[in-house]
């Protein structure tokens, strides 16, 4: 059974309307983390430029 990414509780995929979260509260906590920039999508790494050239 999948687990909630916020509180690690079991999530019933057939009965829970807030999948992948176990509740609306956990969904809002996750949203708050994105808005506070606790989470971020990393930028692709640029190739290192050779200073010798």
Image (spheres, helix red, strand yellow):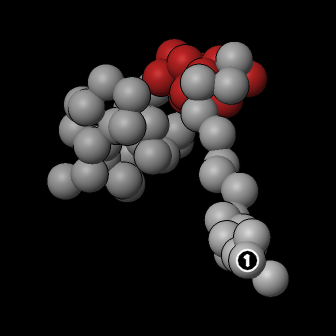
Residue in front for this viewpoint, 23 or 47: 47
Using the rendered view, name the quadrant where residue 43 is placed: bottom right
- Is 51 on the left-hand or right-hand side of 7? right
- Is 15 on the left-hand or right-hand side of 17? left
Residue at 75%, 70% in the rendered image: 51
Where 53 sits versus 2, above or below? below
- Is 21 on the left-hand or right-hand side of 43? left
In this figure, which residue is indicated by the disc labeled 1?
Answer: 52
Where 47 sits versus 40, above or below? below
Residue 31 visible in the displayed image: no
Residue at 47%, 23% in the rendered image: 26
Where 45 sits versus 21, above or below? below
Q: Among all residues in the image, which is located at the extreme right?
A: 53
Residue at 55%, 18% in the rendered image: 29
Q: Secondary structure at mark 1?
A: loop
Q: Position of residue 6 (x, y in %)?
A: 39, 28
Residue at 24%, 31% in the rendered image: 9
Using the rendered view, name the quadrant where residue 39 is placed: top right
Quarter occupied by the C terminus? bottom right
């Amino acid at each position: 059974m999948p687990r909630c990414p916020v509180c690690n509780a079991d999530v019933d995929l057939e009965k829970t309307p807030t999948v992948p979260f176990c509740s609306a509260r956990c969904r809002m906590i996750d949203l708050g983390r994105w808005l506070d920039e606790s989470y971020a999508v990393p930028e692709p790494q640029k190739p290192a430029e050779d200073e010798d050239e």
